[in-house]
Image: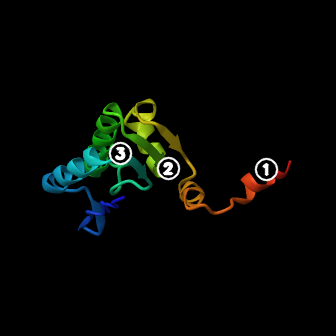
Amino acid sequence: MQTIHLSFVGKASGILDSRGLLSDDLSKTAVLRAKTIVWNGPAGVFEFEAFAKGTKAIMDAVVEATEKGCVTIIGGGDTATAAKNFGTEDKVSHVSTGGGASLELLEGKVLPGVDALTDA
């Protein structure tokens, strides 16, 4: 298994800026090579159109990867909101608002809510 960290972030006037074309191409290449993607956290301040390009580029690549058979899991409220805003909720394998909790579950940690339901 190979982990690829996509943290291409710059600054413009003290605000997280969207990424450039080169980093978008690098991200797409990495995403399309993956067999499983767990995405937690957008690339910048996607809520503002001027800064949404990086998150949108990753989302488009994730949708393309899903269409090619990749299992894609979007976790976290902000990333789930991005999927909703871009109209891609139904174009990926799974969308969850539980970002941190989803990651902990994948790590094998016991989640209190799940544990309580298991005992019921």
SS class, disc 1: helix
**Residue kind at label 3, given as amino acid type:** Lys
Where is residue 40? Give x, y as percent: 44, 55
Which residue occupies 27% across, 64% down? 9
Quarter in which the N terminus is drawn: bottom left
Q: In this view, does 112 lie to the left or right of 102?
A: right
Tell me which label, 1 or 2, sits earlier in the chain: 2
Front one among 78 and 7: 7
For label 2, count other residues whose C-alpha is less than 10 Å away and answer few (under 14), some (14-19) or many (20+): many
Where is residue 110? Give x, y as percent: 68, 61
Front one among 86 and 30: 30
For label 3, count other residues whose C-alpha is less than 10 Å away and answer few (under 14), some (14-19) or many (20+): some
Residue closest to the far right: 120
Point out the frontmost of discs 1 and 2: 1
Which residue occupies 29% across, 39% down? 60
Q: Cβ–Cβ below 8 Å for labels 2 and 3?
A: no
Where is residue 43? Give x, y as percent: 33, 56
Front one among 54 and 102: 102
Q: Mark 1 points at which residue?
A: 118
**Residue kind at label 1, given as amino acid type:** Thr
User: Count of labels shown?
Assistant: 3
Q: Mark 2 points at which residue?
A: 75
Residue 72: name its quadrant.
top left
**Residue kind at label 2, given as amino acid type:** Gly
Above-or-below relation of 112 to 87: below
Tell me which label, 2 or 3, sits earlier in the chain: 3
Q: In this view, does 34 lie to the left or right of 120?
A: left
Q: How far separated are the C-alphas under marks 2 and 3?
A: 17 Å
Which residue occupies 55% across, 56% down? 106
Q: Mark 3 points at which residue?
A: 35
Q: How far separated are the C-alphas under marks 3 and 1?
A: 30 Å
